[in-house]
Amino acid sequence: MQYPSAVPDTGPAPDADPFPGLVGFTAALRAAGVPMTTDRVAAFTEALDTLDVTSRTQTYWAGRLTLCSDPDDIRRYDAAFAAWFDPAQGPRSPAPGDRPPPPPTLRSLMPARDRGEESGEDEDDESPVVRATATGAEVLRTRDLGELSPLEREHLRRLLALLRPDPPTRASRRRGPSRHGSPDPRRTLRAALRNEGEIGALYRRAPTRRPRKVVLLIDVSGSMEPYADALLRFAHVVVRRSPRSTEVFTLGTRLTRVTRELRQRDAERALRDASRAIPDWSGGTRLGEAVQAFVDRWGQRGAARRAVVVVFSDGWERGEPDLLGRQVQRLSRLTHKLVWVNPHAGKEGYAPVQGGIVAVLPHLDQLLAGHSLETLERLLAVMRDA
C-alpha cells in the first residue's frame, strides 16, 4: 500500500479567508473523483472551525478524516490537496517512500495558555491534561437569550428553526384498527362477506390518539423585551408543527392573538406581521387584566379546556397581584396542565419573590426556566409528556 505524501506544517494555508477556498477545494475533490455530499462538506468546515485552519497538518487531516470514505479516495485526495495548496508544484502521484504527516495531538490543539507555555510548566510532565472544547452550537444552547450578540442571535434563529417538537396527545373517542383491543364487528363481518360468509380473522379496534390543544401566552412588556423575539420564534416553531391545535397570545397592557400571523411558513415574515399586530410591544405590564381577558373571551369558550397552557413571563405586575392570582386560578381549573416559564428562574440566586409569581405559584403545575435554548428544549419535553 502506498502512503500519501508528507504535508509539512510550514505555515499558514494560502487563503486568508478559509471557507470559500476550502469549499472550492471540495469541488476540486469532486472533480478528481472523490464522492462529495453536503454532509461531508459540513463536517469538514465544522472540523476546521474547531481546529487551527492556518495549520496545513490540521487542514490535511480534517479533510482526510471527513471527506474520504474509501481507501481508493486517499490517493485522489493527496493529489488534489497538493494541487490546490501547492499550485506551483502541480499535481503529482505519491512516491513509494512517502508517509502521511502524523495526526495532531490533543496537546498541539490546545491554546498556549492551556499547554502551560506562558506559566513555565514542564513540557515533560508525565500526567497529561486532556481538555475538550465545546462547539459553538453547544455553548450557545446554554447562553442567556437576553445577553446574545447580533451574530449569536442569528445563529440562534437557525437553531430554533431546527427544533422538531412532538405535540402532546390525548385519547380520542373514536376507535381505529389495532392489533389489540376490543373486537371490531363491522370489519370482521365485512371481511366474512367477502369470504363467502366464513370468518377468517377477528379484527380489533382501540381508541386513537389526537393532538391536545396547546396555548402559549407570551409576555411582551418592557422587562421581557430581551427574550420576546426568541420566544415568538419558538412559538412559530410550535405553531408550524401543529397549526390546528395551537394558539398564541401576547400579554402586556392588553391581550393580542397572533396565531394567524405565526401560521405562515416563512419565519421572518411571520415575526414581522406579528410585531405589527402587537400594539403594546415593550410597554407596561398588566398580567391580571390580560389573563382575565383570555379566560373570558377564549378560555371558557374552549381554547383552554383540557389544554396545555404555557405562560412566558417574569412575573412583574404593575396591577394588583391578587387579581392575577384569581385569574390564574380560574385558568388552572380549565387546563389539563398549566406551566409558567420565567426567564430568571434558571439564574443563580433566583427566588420567586415577585408579587406576580408569589400570587400564581400555588395554582401552577410547574415553574420552569426559559432563559436559554436548552431550557426551551426541556419545555418541549414537558409539553410532550403532558
Image: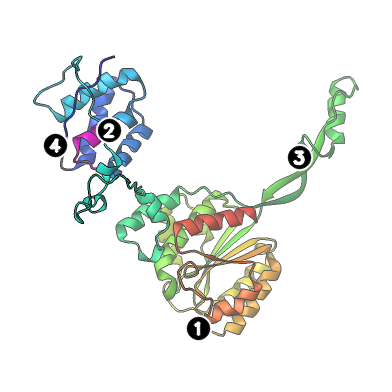
Crowdedness of circle 3 by 10 Å Cα count: few (<14), some, many (20+)? Answer: some
Query: Helix, strand or loop at disc 4?
Result: loop
Of labels 2 and 4, earlier in sequence is 4
Asked if labels 2 and 1 touch by Cβ distance under 8 angstroms, the answer is no
Q: Residue furthest right?
A: 197
- For residue 103, the mark is 2
Which is more foreground, mark 2 or mark 4? 2
Q: Quadrant of residue 38?
A: top left
Of labels 3 and 4, earlier in sequence is 4
Q: Which span of residues is magenta-colored?
A: 51-60
Which is more foreground, mark 1 or mark 4? 4
Q: Which residue is mark 4?
A: 14
Query: Which residue appears at 87% of the width and 24% of the height?
Result: 193
Of labels 1 and 3, earlier in sequence is 3
Question: Can you give x and y, in whole percent of width and height, for residue 345 in the image?
Answer: 50, 69
Q: Can you say which quadrant of the picture contains the N terminus? A: top left
Please, what is the three-letter code of the amino acid marked with disc 4? Pro
Measured in 3D between alpha carbons, the distance from the residue under mark 2 to the one under mark 4, in whole angstroms, is 21 Å
Measured in 3D between alpha carbons, the distance from the residue under mark 1 to the one under mark 2, in whole angstroms, is 62 Å
